[in-house]
């Protein structure tokens, strides 16, 4: 069963493990924006629902979407996600992730809900 990343983060902190600041920001940011991220990923993953995706692919997409929305240049976010997919997931995952993130990155600014769940303009 998939455990929330935020609970793993808390376990690591309680155990005194060192967690890089950026890693903690990603975990907390993805957790806070999960409904928005999953909605957008689902809208851009042709013929796939988020929960049917492989756990690794779904996780990579969630992190990369958060990075895109946080201002990381699309080329960097997408290239890193594709690279990680090549190392950790199936043979076709890189192409799938590249396609989904390419569509997400082309989405016009202002169409993604902000953190307070109101539309931005």
Image (cartoon, helix red, strand yellow):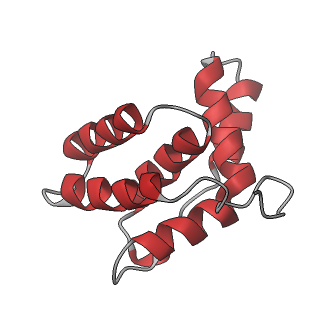
Q: Eyeballing the image, is 7 above or below 41?
A: above
User: Of residues 65 and 6, which is closer to you in this image?
Assistant: 65
- In the rendered structure, the answer to whether residue 85 lies left or right of residue 115 reads left
- In the rendered structure, the answer to whether residue 82 lies left or right of residue 92 reads right
Residue drawn at (54%, 61%) of the image: 2
The quarter of the displayed image where residue 118 is located: bottom right
On the image, the x and y values in percent for residue 113 come to: 73, 61
Q: Quadrant of the C terminus?
A: bottom right
- In the rendered structure, the answer to whether residue 89 lies left or right of residue 3 reads left
How many numbered marks have been drawn onto this rendered protein structure?
0
Q: Eyeballing the image, is 36 above or below 22?
A: below
The quarter of the displayed image where residue 67 is located: top right
User: Of residues 2 and 38, which is closer to you in this image?
Assistant: 38
On the image, the x and y values in percent for residue 51 come to: 48, 75
- In the rendered structure, the answer to whether residue 28 lies left or right of residue 98 reads right
Q: Eyeballing the image, is 50 above or below 62?
A: below
Residue drawn at (16%, 60%) of the image: 92
Residue drawn at (23%, 57%) of the image: 93
User: Of residues 90 and 8, which is closer to you in this image?
Assistant: 90
């Amino acid at each position: 069963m998939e455990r929330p990343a935020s609970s793993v983060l808390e376990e690591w902190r309680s155990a005194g493990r060192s967690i890089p600041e950026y890693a903690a920001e990603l975990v907390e940011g993805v957790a806070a924006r999960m409904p928005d991220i999953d909605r957008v990923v689902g809208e851009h993953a042709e013929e796939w629902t988020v929960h049917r995706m492989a756990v690794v692919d779904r996780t990579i997409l969630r992190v990369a979407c958060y990075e895109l929305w946080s201002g990381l240049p699309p080329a960097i976010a997408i290239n890193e996600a594709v690279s990680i997919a090549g190392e950790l997931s199936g043979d076709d995952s890189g192409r799938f992730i590249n396609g989904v993130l390419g569509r997400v990155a082309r989405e016009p600014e202002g169409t993604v809900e902000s953190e307070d769940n109101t539309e931005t303009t």
